[in-house]
Image (cartoon, helix red, strand yellow):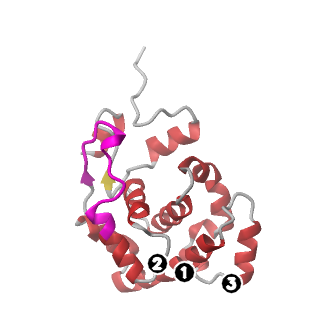
Amino acid sequence: MAAPLKRCWNVDKPLYVRYHDEEWGIPLHDDQKLFEFLVLDGFQAGLSWWLILERREMFRDAFDCFDPAKVAKYTAKDVERLMAAPGVIKNKAKILATITNAQQFLQIQKEFGSFDAYIWQFVQGKTIQNAFKEFSQMPTETEESRAMNQDLKKRGFKFVGPTICYAFMQAAGLVNDHLVDCFRYVQLNR
């Protein structure tokens, strides 16, 4: 009988297992998914990631599958709809920030050809490979996440502080923060 796979955190919920094994830390280059991760990390501020993860499908439904071109055109009526949408965090500032961020996201796509080309410049185009043995070693922000935060804010983005940027970097694979004894660490360190 094979030993169970060692994971970064004690995952006893199938949704968490799938997220850990199939998404977290995998280098992401799809603009729409990058926008989704940026939005979800912004909504997570002050809340648990589990809350966001279990409501993710409701967020997708409410925010047109995180299509930035659609979200950028949202009106006051859409804000009202989102404030009443099941599963969406009822935080008007975060909802308004999502619309603003979609508009700025489109500007970056025009300027750089893709959001992917823009965002990966903060790590010189390749994943930063960390080697943490414990979560206590992991930073909440880094020089790169602070630079990302400053540039995004300068471009008009909201809810993109350096801690949110670092969580985004972890989720989108700009950094490999799987713990060294996690089975995903070696797979993503190739």
Amino acid type of the residue tagged 3 in the rendering: Thr
Residue 160's mark? Answer: none
Q: Identify which residue is drawn at 55% across, 31% down.
A: 12
- Quick check: is 129 in the magenta stretch? yes
Residue 106 picture location, percent across and down: 47, 82
Q: Identify which residue is drawn at 40% across, 19% down.
A: 3
Pointer 3 local density, CA inside 10 Å: few below 14, some 14–19, many at least 20: few
Q: Residue 118 lies in what quarter of the image?
A: bottom left
Query: On the image, numbered disc 2 is attached to which residue?
Result: 157
The boundaries of the magenta stretch are 128-146
Q: Are marks 3 and 2 in contact (CB under 8 Å)?
A: no
Q: Are marks 3 and 1 in contact (CB under 8 Å)?
A: no
Query: On the image, numbered disc 1 is attached to which residue?
Result: 100
Lateral position of residue 57 relative to residue 129, left or right: right
Residue 122 picture location, percent across and down: 28, 68
Query: On the image, numbered disc 3 is attached to which residue?
Result: 75
- Quick check: is 65 in the magenta stretch? no
Pointer 1 local density, CA inside 10 Å: few below 14, some 14–19, many at least 20: some
Height in image: 85 above or below 133?
Answer: below
Amino acid type of the residue tagged 2 in the rendering: Phe
In terms of sequence position, does the residue under pointer 3 or pointer 1 come before the other? Answer: 3
In terms of sequence position, does the residue under pointer 3 or pointer 2 come before the other? Answer: 3
Amino acid type of the residue tagged 1 in the rendering: Thr
